[in-house]
Amino acid sequence: MARDEQLKQRWDVLVEKLSNQFADGDILDVDGIIYLIGIQELGKFNKKFKKDEKVNIMHIAICRLLEPFGYYEFSHFDNDGWPHYHVKDQLPHLKAGEQTVLMKEAIVQYFIDNTYIH
């Protein structure tokens, strides 16, 4: 199976599974899944977040997702338990479609690594 076909197949399985588990069957988009990953990485599941905190949660997820690609490196947890990363390598300039593919690859790999999907 071609790499792109495998990514699409895994992505579809992941979206369906996450949507059924966390969105009552409403289809989650990339941003929604990134937010879920951020909450998972933060580990604060029963808290209401302000708008700026939600942006920070998504940033945590993006850093965590791109860490295996060598773009970010975990630095530390602050006193409030929020993880911090530093830039290890600058992201290349990508077109919007290329950015989406990179994020989908990273998201799928994250859930494979965490044995949520195969």
Image (spheres, grey):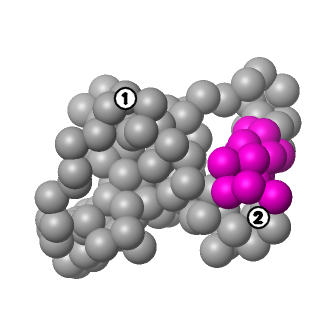
73 above or below 63? Answer: below
What amino acid type should be assigned to the residue bearing mark 1? Ala
Which residue occupies the foreground of this view, 83 or 68?
Answer: 68
Q: Main secondary structure of the magenta part?
A: helix
The span picked out in magenta is 1-15
Identify the residue at horizontal 25%, vertical 67% (top origin): 72
Quadrant in the picture for residue 99: top left
Which residue is label 2 attached to?
116
Quadrant in the picture for residue 64: bottom left
2 above or below 104? Answer: below
The answer to whether residue 91 is magenta is no
The disc label shown at residue 67, or none: none
**Which quarter of the image is occupied by the N terminus?**
bottom right
Identify the residue at horizontal 15%, vertical 58% (top origin): 90
Which residue is label 1 attached to?
96
Q: Is residue 61 left or right of residue 55?
A: right
Identify the residue at horizontal 75%, vertical 72% (top origin): 115
